[in-house]
Image (cartoon, rainbow, N blue to C red):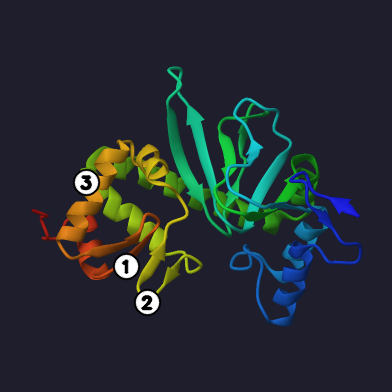
Amino acid sequence: MAVSSAGRKRPRGRLPKVIAREFCAMEGHGRLPLGNILSPAEQTELAKIATVLEYQTGGMAIFSEGEDAHFLYLIDDGVVRISWHLPDGSRQVLGFMWPGDLFGLAEEGRYVNTAESLTSATIFRFPLERLRRLLLQEPMLQLHLLTKAAHELRRAQRQIIVLGQLQNVKRLASFIMDCRQHVGFFDSRARLLRLPMSRSDIADYLGTSAESVARAFTALERDGLLRRISPRSVELLDSDRLARLVRGIGDNLR
């Protein structure tokens, strides 16, 4: 039986999830996380060099800042937390990676941050050297992956704007609207958003304290924009007003 680095054994004869998803994409029954930018042929080529890792719980290390970088990663299912630590030991959460996201870009051959599973997760791992050879052979695949990487860069730039220009309530509102885009975590009919991250995770991402995040939730709830169902789930009562709040159109919270 094959064993992933996350420690789970796969029964012999079972197709790895990356290949099973790829076959579904070609048959029109589904698609890979990169199916929106890659052709079926390109997905097939990537699948040939991929290893599937399954993380059964949150809090499992995928790689740590400073380690030699040998792989690029793509999330099939679950959420990954990307962070780094300041010299004083405090943590800054740089982002949350969702299904379809690429992560693991390195600088001078080393990972510049730490990646951990935030939930149970299924992740495709691509050896960088084999990926480089494949991209040299497939120029269009190289272009498509570059497009995906540019999207991730734009998202990081947007976070800088959010942290630098918005006060805490608007930061939280922006974060909630971002999470709302991920269909696996938002039930549009029930208007229920499931947050896979803790309050301290959100605080470290927004550059504030857990207490400030709690107060921001209270402000949004008091103004009828959401209702807290549990520590990690909220009902979005008025998504349009949340969006206007983030854009700064009216709606000054009390």
Q: CA distance from mark 1 to mark 3?
A: 17 Å
Image quarter for residue 190?
A: bottom left
- How far separated are the C-alphas under marks 3 and 2? 25 Å
Q: Which residue is mark 1?
A: 235
Tell me the quadrant of the picture where the N terminus can be found.
bottom right
Tell me if residue 14 comes above or below residue 104 in the rendering: below
Depicted 179 relative to depicted 21: above or below: above
Q: Which badge, 2 or 1, is on the more N-terminal residue?
A: 2
The residue under label 2 is 190
Residue 11 percent coordinates (x, y): 87, 62
SS class of the residue under badge 3?
Answer: helix
To which quarter of the image does residue 227 belong?
bottom left
Q: Position of residue 178 (x, y in %)?
A: 38, 58
Give how far apart the Cα atoms at labels 2 and 1 are: 8 Å
Q: Which residue is mark 3?
A: 215
106 or 74: nearer the viewer: 74
Residue at x-position 20% and y-position 63%: 244
Residue furthest to the left: 254
Name which residue lies at 66% across and 48% down.
Answer: 73
As shown in the figure, which amino acid type bears the numbered disc 1?
Glu
Q: Position of residue 225 (x, y in %)?
A: 21, 64
Label 1: few (<14), some (14–19) or many (≥20) C-alpha neighbours in 10 Å: many
